[in-house]
Amino acid sequence: AAAMAGEALSQVPDVQIDGDGVFKYVLVRVRGAGALAKDVVRGHAWAEYHADLFERTAEELAPHGLSCECLGGGRVSHRPEERKIHVYGYSVGFGRADHAVTTEKLKAEYPNYEITWADEGY
């Protein structure tokens, strides 16, 4: 089961965000069997609340034997025409995500972008 959970965990994309605009995001710790875990970023404009993003992520991953814990949230401003992403703000329900962690994940996914973050702002 641990090998399957590890395989399932490796299939989970580190980053899924909308292609442009300003939207809420959550940082989610995804756990497989045993001590396997990784943090993923999910941000979409359709989400009215940070909880919507977290719940959708948890629902999608549960059938694969993966559990989720929300580490916090914030907002993402994605401007593809300028190749810029800015991470800021917080989630009322989950608290502020570690934007530094989120930024590192985004840099891996968008290597040609200028990616910044700030703790202020909503």
Image (tube, rainbow, N blue to C red):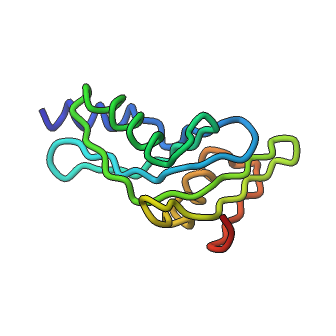
The residue lying furthest to the right in this view is 81
Mark count: 0
Q: Picture coordinates of residue 122 (x, y %)?
A: 66, 64
Q: Picture coordinates of residue 98 (x, y %)?
A: 50, 66
Q: Quadrant of residue 72?
A: bottom left
The residue lying furthest to the top in this view is 63
**Residue at point 16% right, 42% down?**
33
The residue nearer to you, when weighing 77 against 103, is 77
**Residue at point 49% right, 62% down?**
92
On screen, residue 88 above or below 110: below
Q: Quadrant of residue 65?
A: top left
**Residue at point 52% right, 43% down?**
42
Q: Quadrant of the N terminus?
A: top left
The residue nearer to you, when weighing 42 against 50, is 50
The residue lying furthest to the bottom in this view is 120
Q: Picture coordinates of residue 113 (x, y %)?
A: 76, 51
**Residue at point 47% right, 36% down?**
13
